[in-house]
Each structure stands twice: as C-alpha cells, then as structure tokens.
Image (cartoon, coloured by chain):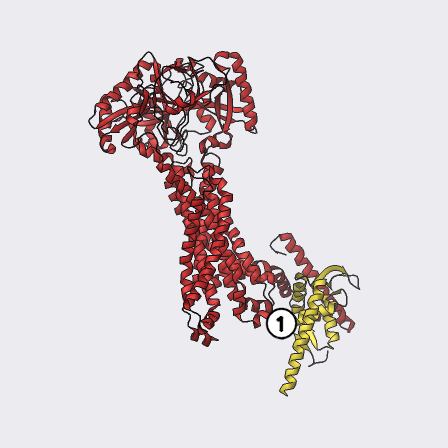
Chain colours: A red, B yellow
C-alpha cells in the first residue's frame, strides 16, 4: 500500500503501530508485575526490554514504503547501470526508438496542428462557413449578395453573428512602385464574429461602415512590420488603393490570418452602398459564429428555414436558393485529411517495426542474461519484481530514445513545413506541451510493446535448473521466435514499400500523360484589378485587350492570352447547358466543364482547332468553342458547329454560338481524362484573369521585360505571381509529391530496420551455432554449403515475410486507392518489384553473417569446449 | 531466563528467511498477537531463541504485506485491543516450501559435518 496515498491513511497506520507495540509493552509490564515488581519498576523494565519503539515504528513504515518508491528508484539505478554496461546494445536501441518515436511525433504534430486543434480564434469551433446553394446548377455553391447576408443575419436565431468577405489582389500605390496587396473586403461584424481585436488602434466605427463615410483600413501585423517598421504612430499613416487614400485605424494581431496568410489589408464594405442593393449579385463567402450550445444541424435547419422564407418573399431571386452550414475548420483543411492520416499510419507502422526490432534484440539479450536473472530469483526476488526491473530498463531506454526523438521531431517538422508549405494551417505546426505529452505516451507504449514480452519471458526461468544449464541450449531454443519477429518486420516493411511503390508509379504515370496542351515556355502572371471595374464591362474589356496587344507586341513573345482558370491545375467547374436549336428533352442532359478564355488561348496553349474556325470576340455576341469530347458525346452524328448553347439561370451570359471544335486537353487536372468542355471566348471574364504568355526563348528571362511593359501602360497596377505554367502544375500536385516523398522515406527506413533485424538475428544464430558449424566443417562440409544454408534460412524467412506483406499491402491498398493515378491498388508488377527488391536487400544483409559462419575455424571452436 | 543459554535472533545472526519460517510455523497454531509469538518462540525453543521486537514486528508486517499472514484487530484475553495474525492459504504453501528447503539444507549440513569428522 503506498504510504504517500493520503496523510490520513498515514496517521491511522501510525496509530495502529502505536497500539500494537503498546500492547506488547503492557504485556511485558504485566509479566514483570507478576514477578513481583512495583508497577513503576515493571513499566521501566518493560520499556527497557522492548527497546526503541520509535525506531521499530520507523522500520514498520519502511516495510510499507519500500516496494513502491524505493524499488522504483532501485530499478532505475539498475537500469542506468545496465545501459552503461552495454553501450553498443543501448545505443542501437535508443537510436532506433529515437527514429521511430521522432518520426511519429513529427507527423503527429502536423495532425495535431492541422486536423485536431480548433482554429486559432477564441472558441474557433463555433465558426461556420455558410454556403448559398443554388439548387439548379451542378456547381451549386454560389456567393452571397450583401442584402441576403444582412437578411440571414437579421432573421436567424442560431448564430451570434453572420458576416462575410471576399478578397481581391489590389495595388497599393503610395510607394515608388505599385505593390500588389491582397485585400479582404469584409461585411459588418467581421471581427466580432472572429472574436479578434486589433493589437494597435481600433476596429471600424459605424461611420466607416456607411456609404460615403471616411475611408478606413485595418492592416496585418506583417504589413505593419514591413512597411512601417512596427511604428506605433502608424495610425497617422495612409495607404493608396484605387486612387483613393485610406486611413489606417488599426493593426491586427500577428496570429490572425484570415481569409489566408497573404491577406494584408481589411476594408469595410458599407451594406448601404448602391452596388450592394442587388439580390442577384453574389459577393460574399459568409462566416457565422454559432450561439453556445447550438449544433451544426440545428443551425443548418434554421438557416434553411430563413432562406425558404426569403424565397417566398423574393421569388425571382431567392426561390432556387437554399443554405448550407459547414464548420470553417473543414473548409480550411480541405482534402489533406486523408494524406495526413495515411502518413500517420505509415509512421506508426515504422514505430511498430522499430519495436519489433527491439523485441528481438531484448530477447537475445535476455537469453544472455538468463544466468543473472536466475541468481536474482534464487536470492528471493519475485517474478513480478524481475519483470518490473526488466521493464524499467526498457522504459529508461525508451525515454532516452523519446528525448532524442523530440529533437528528431523538431528537425523533421521543420523539413515538413518546408515541404508542405502549400498545406493549410501549416504555419501553426510547432512542438509544444501536447507534443511532449504525446511523445511521452509513445515511449510508455513503446516500453510495453518492446519490453513486456521479453521481460515476462526473461523472468520465466527455472530457479534451480537454469543455474545448472549451459547457456548454449537456451540460446538456440529462442531463435524461432526471433525469426518470426524478423518475418513480421519484413512484412510491415513490404507493406510500406508497396504503398510507396504505388505512389511513385502514379507519380510517374502522371508525368507521362500527354495533356493535350503544351505547358512549356509559358509564363503566367496576374495584373491587379478590382471588382469595381465590372460596373463598366466595356472599359474592362478594352483594358485587357490593350494589355494583351502590348504583350504580344514584345519581341520574344509568341502569343498572349487570358483564362479564368489555369489549364491542368485541378479545378472542376461543371455546368448544365441547353442547346437553343433543340426541343427541350428532359432526358437529354448536357453537362460540360466551363472554361472562359480569350480567343488567343488556343494558339498560346497549342490546342489544335479540329473543325470550324477560331472564335471571335466582339462587343455584341459571345462565341464558344467546344472540345472533341463534347462533339462526340452530344453530337455523335451531326456537327455542333452553328448551334447556340445557353446556361440556364445565368442572367449575365447570353447564348453563345459554337464556332469550332478544339482538340481534347486535360483542362481540369493532369490526372483527369478530358471531359466535354465548352470554352466561352471572353478575354475579360474577371478584372484579374490569368495572363498566359508563350515566349520564343527562355521564358523566365522574359519576366523583366513583361513587367516593364505592363508598368509602362498601367502605371497604377502591379504585376504579381509571375510563374511558369509548369511550376503551377508542379505546385498543384504538391500534396501528392509530399506524401510520395514521405512515404518513400518511411518505407526505406522500414526496409533498413528490417534488414538490421535480419542481420542481427542471423549473426546471433551464427554465433550460437558456431560449435555445430565447426564440427560440420571438421567433418568435411564445404564452406559453400554453410553459406548457402544460412543464406537460405534468412531468405526463407524474408520470403514468408514478403508474402505476408503482399497480403497486408493488398488489404490496406483501399487507403491509397483515392491517391493513385494510372495504377491499380493491387498492381502486380509494382508489388512484385517491391518483393524482389526486398529479397535482394535481405540477401545482402544476410550475406555477411553467412560468410562469417563459413569462416569459423573448427579447431578453435572445438578447443573452446 | 537461564544466563548464558539465550541466543537472540538478530538480523545478522540468522538468515531473515529463518525467522520468517519460524513465525509462519508458530502462527499455524491459530490466531496470535506479536507478544504471544515472542513468548511461544521462547517457550518452544526452551529459552534458546530470543527474538528482538525490533526484528519481530518488521518481519510480521513484511509477511502480512506478502500475503502470507492475514491480520485483524480483536480483543485479547484481558479485554484489550490487539492485532492478531493468522496463516493465509498462500502462507501455508510458503511454509511447506520453506520447511522442505530447511530440512534439505539441514540434512546437507549435517551430513557434511559427519563426513568431515
């Protein structure tokens, strides 16, 4: 019973000791009185005979205390002594664990920061993204009109507040050169909903949130440091955007990074501004903060009711709309969940392999220590005490491994942040108390995984028998188990390697596809523009035409085009269209991908025109091009050329005439087969489309000239994100690349560990069987036979492990199926290659011990007996 | 107390295991308190073995902790509260083991002494 459990318990124990000992003294006193002494004399003699009662009590306390604290302390001292006594063994174990635990903690730190933690705002789990859903289109989520946002905020009963935002890349022109800055335009209540207050200055006041009120902005901490050197007088400064001066009223905290980490200026949008009075214009992505205790489902039901009510009130604009509620964390994280858990599964397997390796090492070690343990048992130690002692040794090893593992994790998560800078929330990854705790838990788990079985086995020895036995016979008795462990390691390593192989193969397959367009020698760039320009579409169109003409006129430029989306970067924009010339047939659904491009796009991307002619762009009508898939899917017998397509429910886009058929290109992502696609030929679909410039020479060398030219014709705008199209395509698959690199790294480590395990076990077996080998050599066995025998033993186990691993890989391939491209999850060539590779590496690992066995000197071995 | 004939059991003199075994043996006779045990030891050994209380009580508590003795508080013959110890099932087995070990050891020692003569 632990004496430290409670002070009361200690008190009652003490009282019990007192009365037990006191009873004894009284009996002695009675005895003395019976012998004829006076009571005082009798008591004195009794006390004298009994001795120091206090000292005895102290010993009684020790009886209670000793096993818990002192034994633990003793075990730890013993463990440290044991580690010092066998440094090479300990170093191998500690490093293996450091690697396993470190990698595990690093991946966990990413999972913790990205998936598990709430968003970094006060009670961030109550923040929701509110979606306006258009029931009649395939890509239903549309942006919210300011009027409707205010309606939702006023009529709902489940949110503390609803706000919204949209972003724009604008030019800030107070410096010598215009600087591109990401501006977030925010609806009222934005900072209250997030629960964030400026670190310097104040939020917007009501005058600033009214149309015609003073121009006010909040700036990011980063911009404050960069542009103003963290000057506390920043509130007297102004910025220039869209030819207007904006007063800085506050600086937001460094941790605030919403809508994204590039946002630098927050500008209030007055809800009473004239352009904001149209119910059909979508502006905002809406964010709401749930009232405490409200569930997502309740909020969704409430918002649907509100929108249904609005549908009755404004049938023309609101009838087809409904509302959705999704936790903001989900939309922030996006699709990385699967990749992260897959990687976590992989590092956990790695840790398991590391532990298996250590189990084998500890078993071998335990066999050598059998004698020591038998001595301890015969000296009165219980088996439980021996198990505790052996477990303490494992725990000290695991703890040391975990501490080094923390450093490994720190380095690894730096590397991870570098590799994964495209992932959401990656800046929030850091090592803290939670990761420390997790690492500690890992080391306890590793102790139990690695240590429990060898400890129980180690303590199982026969008391008298083991002392008498020779060490040799016990050693060989343990080998089958160690071989089993080697097989397990090989199986797990093959599982990981199989996964990595499949990911590598799909990466390769992705590199081999012919995209249908030519991404080489194409520069992409942006020029700042504001949504305010959409008020005068003609002016916007002529600005972009002028820019394109100027770019084309530059020497070295072959063609220049605009596009709403980048070709090959995964992005689907599906729509349902109708053909004006056809009777409406409810069974005929024309679903297409939508692209909006300038007519020059086809030349710039080298997408061939197969039939008809290139579309033309003029003010009065819209032309479209379709791809070959569209033609063969919807006009298998006739030609689509000359027909008019319409997008029902889109009041802004008039019907377009199909002018020609273009070749199929993988527009929606290199990993997707071309889908039926309609290209709307509009150069200015937005104020800030992508510009695509095909150069005759090295494209990066042209960047400066392009920038200078745009500066010349548009002095108030800035050029930004000048990147090769090929870089965009690379970035688009960054997550893909990240998980491929990491899984490959993990599986290579796993294979190395398995080989170390094989090497160790075979070496051990060779040492244990030296006498037998020596004898056989002496009797005329050939060295080759000995080598073959040991090599085959190692390879047989490896082969069995490989087969088990193949089964495991096949069973777990479902995890990967979503991440693969161009290769099936049970692809036999890949798995066969993996198995062959494993066998080859295993053969190399087994060769050295096998050769050593053949070089046993028979005379020496026989003499050792 | 015959002078000169007393042999106190000190921790250093006799193996601790021996004292444990003796206690277990005495306790087989029925529930008994610490004072009673020391009396019995002295009586049965005809005043040869004298157990110091400083050894007796820690041993009792250790045996109780190992589960070989069970203890409970009860009234002594003169009506006072005393702690009574009795042998548990586990203790019975342990005693059997220790007795046979002791007999083997004693037999071995005796035969060595006889051969040496």
Any part of residue A844 in sight = yes
Look at the image and tell me in which quarter the N terminus of chain A lies: bottom right
Residue A489 horizontal/vertical position (percent): 48, 53
* Above/below status of A785 relative to A245: below
x 41%, y 61%: residue: A847
Please indicate whether residue B98 sits to the left or right of residue A210 in the image: right
Residue A390 horizontal/vertical position (percent): 54, 60
- The residue pinned by badge 1 equals B11
Q: Looking at this view, name the residue that lies furthest to the front.
A: A637
x 31%, y 16%: residue: A617
Query: The numbered mark 1 sits on a residue in which chain?
Result: B
* Above/below status of A320 relative to A748: above
Residue A325 horizontal/vertical position (percent): 51, 26
Please indicate whether residue A622 sits to the left or right of residue A394 in the image: left
* Above/below status of A792 relative to A697: below
How many marks can you see? 1
- Name the foreground residue: A366 vs A582: A582
């Amino acid at each position: 019973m632990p004496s430290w459990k409670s002070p009361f318990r200690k008190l009652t124990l003490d009282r019990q000791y007192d009365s037990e000992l006191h009873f004894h003294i009284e009996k002695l006193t009675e005895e003395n009185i019976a012998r004829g002494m006076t009571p005082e004399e009798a008591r004195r003699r009794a006390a004298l005979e009994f001795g120091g009662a206090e000292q005895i009590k102290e010993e009684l306390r020790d009886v209670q205390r000793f096993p818990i604290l002192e034994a633990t302390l003793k075990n730890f001292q013993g463990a440290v002594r044991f580690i010092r006594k066998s440094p090479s063994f300990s170093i191998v174990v500690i490093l293996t664990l450091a690697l396993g635990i470190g990698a595990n903690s690093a991946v966990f730190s990413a999972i913790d920061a990205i998936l598990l933690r709430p968003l970094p705002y006060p009670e961030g789990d109550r923040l929701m993204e509110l979606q306006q859903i258009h029931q009649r289109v395939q890509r239903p989520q549309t942006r919210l009109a300011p009027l409707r946002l205010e309606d939702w905020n006023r009529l709902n009963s489940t949110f503390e507040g609803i706000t919204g935002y949209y972003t724009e890349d604008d030019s800030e022109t107070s410096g010598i050169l215009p600087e591109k800055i990401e501006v977030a335009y925010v609806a009222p209540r934005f900072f209250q909903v997030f629960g964030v207050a400026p670190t310097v200055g104040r939020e917007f006041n009501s005058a600033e949130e009214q149309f015609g009120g003073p121009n006010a902005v909040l700036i990011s901490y980063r911009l404050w440091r960069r542009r103003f050197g963290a000057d506390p007088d920043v509130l007297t400064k102004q910025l220039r955007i869209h030819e207007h001066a904006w007063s800085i009223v506050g600086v937001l905290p460094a941790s605030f990074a919403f809508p994204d980490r590039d946002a630098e200026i927050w500008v209030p949008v007055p809800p009473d501004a004239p352009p904001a009075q149209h119910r059909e214009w979508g502006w905002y992505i809406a964010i709401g903060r749930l009232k405490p205790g409200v569930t997502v489902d309740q909020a969704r039901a409430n918002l649907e009711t509100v929108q249904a009510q609005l549908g009755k009130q404004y049938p023309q604009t609101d009838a087809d709309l409904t509302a959705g509620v999704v936790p903001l964390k989900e939309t922030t994280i996006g699709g990385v969940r699967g990749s992260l858990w897959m990687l976590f599964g992989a590092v956990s397997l790695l840790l398991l392999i590391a532990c298996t390796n250590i189990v084998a090492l500890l078993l071998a070690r335990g066999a050598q220590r059998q004698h020591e343990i038998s001595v301890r048992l015969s000296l009165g130690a219980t088996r439980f005490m021996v198990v505790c002692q052996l477990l303490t040794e494992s725990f000290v090893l695991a703890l040391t491994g975990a501490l080094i593992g923390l450093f490994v994790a720190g380095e690894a998560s730096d590397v991870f942040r570098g590799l994964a800078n495209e992932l959401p929330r990656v800046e929030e990854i850091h090592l803290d108390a939670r990761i420390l705790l997790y690492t500690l838990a890992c080391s306890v788990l590793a102790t139990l995984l690695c240590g429990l079985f060898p400890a129980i086995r180690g303590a199982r020895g026969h008391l008298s028998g083991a002392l008498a036995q020779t060490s040799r016979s016990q050693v060989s008795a343990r080998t089958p188990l160690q071989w089993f462990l080697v097989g397990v390691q090989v199986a797990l390593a093959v599982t990981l390697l199989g996964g990595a192989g499949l990911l590598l193969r799909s990466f390769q397959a992705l590199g081999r596809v012919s995209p249908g367009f030519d991404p080489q020698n194409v520069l992409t760039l942006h020029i700042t523009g504001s949504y305010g320009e959409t008020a005068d579409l003609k002016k916007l169109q002529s600005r972009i035409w002028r820019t394109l003409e100027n770019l084309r006129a530059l020497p070295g430029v072959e063609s220049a085009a605009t596009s709403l989306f980048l070709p090959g970067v995964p992005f689907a924009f599906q729509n349902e269209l109708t053909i004006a010339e056809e009777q409406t047939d409810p069974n005929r659904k024309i679903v297409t991908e939508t692209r909006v491009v300038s007519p020059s796009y086809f030349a710039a991307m080298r997408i061939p025109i197969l039939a008809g002619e290139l579309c033309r762009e003029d003010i009065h009508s819209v032309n479209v091009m379709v791809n070959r898939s569209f033609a063969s899917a919807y006009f298998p017998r006739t030609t689509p050329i000359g027909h008019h397509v319409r997008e029902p429910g889109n009041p802004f886009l008039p019907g377009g005439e199909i002018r020609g058929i273009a070749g199929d290109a993988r527009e929606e992502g290199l990993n997707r087969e071309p889908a039926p696609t309609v290209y709307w030929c509009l150069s200015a679909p937005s104020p800030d489309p992508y510009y695509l410039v095909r150069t005759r020479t090295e494209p990066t060398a042209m960047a400066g000239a392009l920038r200078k030219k745009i500066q010349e014709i548009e002095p108030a705008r800035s050029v930004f994100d000048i990147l090769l199209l090929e870089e965009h395509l690379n970035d688009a698959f960054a997550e893909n690349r990240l998980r491929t690199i990491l899984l490959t790294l993990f599986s290579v480590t796993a294979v190395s560990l398995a080989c170390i395990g094989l090497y160790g076990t075979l070496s051990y077996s060779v040492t244990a069987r030296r006498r037998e080998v020596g004898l056989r050599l002496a009797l005329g066995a050939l060295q080759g036979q000995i080598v073959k025998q040991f090599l085959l033993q190692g390879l047989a186990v490896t082969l069995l492990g490989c087969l088990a691993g193949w089964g495991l890989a096949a069973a777990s391939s479902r995890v990967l199926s979503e991440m693969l491209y161009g290769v099936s999850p049970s692809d036999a060539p890949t798995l066969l290659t993996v198995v062959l590779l494993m066998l080859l590496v295993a053969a190399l690992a087994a060769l050295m011990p096998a050769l050593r066995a053949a070089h046993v000197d028979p005379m020496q071995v026989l003499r050792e007996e | 107390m015959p002078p000169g004939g007393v042999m106190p059991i000190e921790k250093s003199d006799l193996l601790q295991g021996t004292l444990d075994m003796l206690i277990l043996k005495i306790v087989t006779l029925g529930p008994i308190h610490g004072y009673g045990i020391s009396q019995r030891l002295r009586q049965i050994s005809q005043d040869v073995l004298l157990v110091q209380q400083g050894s007796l009580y820690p041993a009792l508590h250790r045996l109780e902790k190992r589960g070989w003795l069970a203890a409970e508080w009860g009234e002594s013959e003169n009506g006072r509260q005393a702690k009574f110890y009795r042998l548990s099932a586990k203790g019975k087995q342990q005693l059997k083991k220790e007795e046979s070990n002791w007999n083997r050891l004693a037999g071995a020692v005796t035969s060595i002494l006889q051969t040496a003569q």
